[in-house]
Amino acid sequence: MKKFVKVIAVLLLISAPFLYNNLLFDRQPFDDLKTGEIEKVYLFTDGKSEHHEVFDYSEFTDRVKDLELIKRTRTVNEEHQGTVCITIYYRDGSEERISVSPDYIQTDDGIYIGEREESVEFLKYVFRQTIFFDDMTGIADQQRMDEILMLAVNGKTWDEIRDYAKDKLLTGGFPDENLKSFANQGYSPIYIYVLDEDALFKLNNDIMNSVWKSQYKDIVEQAWRDYKHGDSDGDNVPPDYIFTETVDWKGIDFTQDEMGYYYAMIPSEDNRYNMCISVDDTVYVNIDGSVTDNPPFVRSVTFYKQ
């Protein structure tokens, strides 16, 4: 009898790791996560100090459940790996913390080797939210989007990703001045880089129109005042043209003509005429390779009857 007991004990000892492994990994730690039990979810990523709050709990729950643990580990090498830390606050007052990198997943129970493919997809989901914030559906070039997301997955910092996108844009012929204009409007090179051609064209027109209006408005308005008060040399003002009290910029946009000049059309008081004031801000490249970039000036003033 004692011999039989010893045999059972030895068998249990030998099979313990196998049984433990089956019990733990046949049923993953996130299988019981339910959307209705979540109060709040915060994401923290490498390279960004602020947290990002998740609002779509249903998608988040599905994504977390896709994570798979393979086995426990104590040896961790996270060099060149992006990491995401998640804090889940539950309605019952409890909390749970999860840390995910391409090869490792840490839970409140320990550190595990994860299924890399599933972990990478989860990281791309998180980085898409924390890097871009906005919904990029229908406006992003998916290949470039994946390129940027994989830089984050591979452990590149926010600054490194931004510099990468900026370098790609500049070497691809995107004007540096336009990049600066975009930056002044709050758009990073990363956002610009992933836009598809149609979305980039539209945004570029919108931004540059705003920039032109800001830069050239004072020049145009001064020319308009000079004509109104007779301080200009122009003799082409129609005799029945009626100046407005002030320039109402609402509804007036700058447009670039085929010569590269930017012009604004200012209507008369009775809307019978448009006063077209053209601004020249051309950058000239000389034969010797030098660049002439004079301050913008009024190129022409013409009147058109509507």
Image: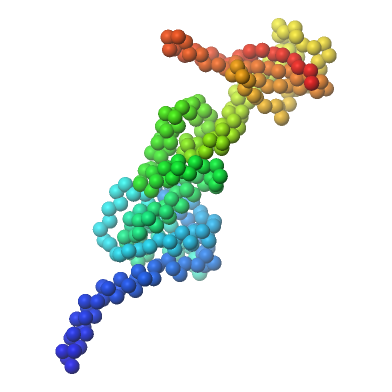
Can residue 243 be seen?
no
- Residue 182 shown left or right of residue 101 in the figure: right
- Residue located 51% across and 59% down the image: 59
Residue 280, horizontal then vertical, whole percent: 60, 15
Residue 84 vertical position relative to residue 186 in the rendered view, above or below: below
Residue at the (72%, 8%) spot, across then down: 234
Q: Residue at x 49, y 49 (%)?
A: 129
Colour scheme of this structure image?
rainbow
Of the pair 57 and 52, the residue shown nearer to us: 57
Q: x, y percentage for residue 205?
A: 59, 30
Q: Is residue 129 left or right of residue 118?
A: right
**Quarter of the figure that contains the C terminus:** top right
Q: Is residue 170 left or right of residue 138?
A: left
Most distant residue in the left direction: 3
Residue drawn where x is 34% and y is 74% of the image: 23
Total numbered circles: 0
Report the quarter where the N terminus lies: bottom left
Q: Position of residue 139 (x, y in %)?
A: 55, 42
Q: Residue furthest bottom?
A: 1
- As displayed, is residue 170 above or below residue 222? below
User: Residue 187: image x %, image y %?
Assistant: 52, 36
Determine whether 84 is above or below 96 in the image: above
- On the question of residue 128 being in view, the answer is yes
Of residues 91 and 251, the one drawn nearer to the viewer in this rendering: 251
Residue 144 vertical placement versus 285 (above, below): below
